Image (cartoon, grey):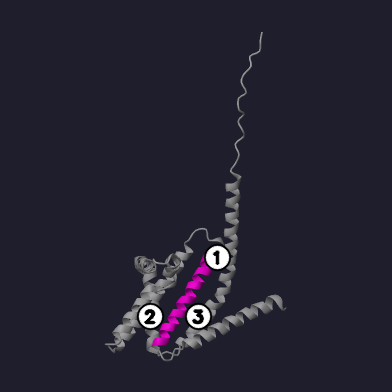
Amino acid sequence: MEKKEFPNLPKKEPRRMPLEAGAKSKIAGLSTKTFGVIKFILGVCLLSFVYSSTVSFLRQFSLVDSASQLYFWSGIITFVLIYFFVFEPAIIYSKGHRLLEIVFSFFSPLVKLAPYVLPIYTIIIFILYSLLSLFFKSRELFYTFIFLFSFSLALHLVFSAKTVRSKKGDFLKANYIFGFSFVYIINILLLSLCLNLIFKEFSFVDFFNSSYLAAKNIFFAVFRQLFLR
């Protein structure tokens, strides 16, 4: 009996995993973690400027008259009480966020950065007061401005911190530590510049110099402890 010959059928090759895709995902994950470590280190370095700028600001602001200090801190405390015990004014922050996105729509990097860095309501309140003060000289107007000025700044800082902290995939919390430290430093610089224009007792130059020297001393102290012992 003759054997039947069958035509040579093509052999099925074993299914291979997409090695390139897997390698790319591993490289992307590694680069993300590496970048996260770098941002974490930079964020820790920025903490010295957070501390020094805060101390220098408080020192300069203590030279301002007591009534202005009272209204300034009252604005911050009022926001905190509203935030914790009444409601979270997130809609107000989001509207300001959207406004800055529209203003800086001509340059995409600023669209992502400006809403977190620039306290839009604080800037608007400062501009409005500067215009109104040309026509109305009133202590009540001034104290109202100081109250709203600090209230709006507290709103911006709290919700910026909350937004940055809530982002997913934040390795070592690097985005939060670096991002909010950067936002805080820029905001306290803007605050000090505005107060320099309002109060003759407040000196932006002295604030900046003392902040820089204090941060430099912190870096030198840490360096000596780590490498010169």
N-term-proximal mark, 1 vs 2 = 2
Q: CA distance from mark 2 to mark 3?
A: 18 Å
Judged from this view, the residue extending furthest toward the left is 135
Q: Is residue 94 magenta?
A: no
Q: Which of the pair 167/99 is nearer the observer?
A: 99
Q: What residue is rendered at 54% in x and 86% in y?
A: 210
Q: Is residue 160 left or right of residue 210?
A: left
Q: Which residues are magenta?
A: 172-197
**With respect to residue 88, does 205 lie above or below?**
below
Q: Which residue is denoted by mark 2 in the rendering?
A: 74
Assign a secondary structure to mark 1: helix
**With respect to residue 22, does 34 lie above or below?**
below
Q: Which residue is denoted by mark 3 in the rendering?
A: 54
Q: Quadrant of residue 116?
A: bottom left
Judged from this view, the residue extending furthest toward the right is 229
Kindly check if marks 1 and 3 are in contact, taking CB atoms under 8 A apart as contact: no
Q: Position of residue 190 (x, y in %)?
A: 44, 79
Q: Position of residue 79 (x, y in %)?
A: 38, 74
Please identify the dominant SS of the magenta region: helix
Kindly check if marks 2 and 3 are in contact, taking CB atoms under 8 A apart as contact: no
Which quarter of the image is occupied by the C terminus?
bottom right
Amino acid type, residue under disc 2 in the picture: Ser
**With respect to residue 2, does 154 lie above or below?**
below
Q: Which residue is denoted by mark 1 in the rendering?
A: 174
Q: Quadrant of residue 173?
A: bottom right
Q: Is residue 112 left or right of residue 130?
A: right
Amino acid type, residue under disc 3 in the picture: Thr
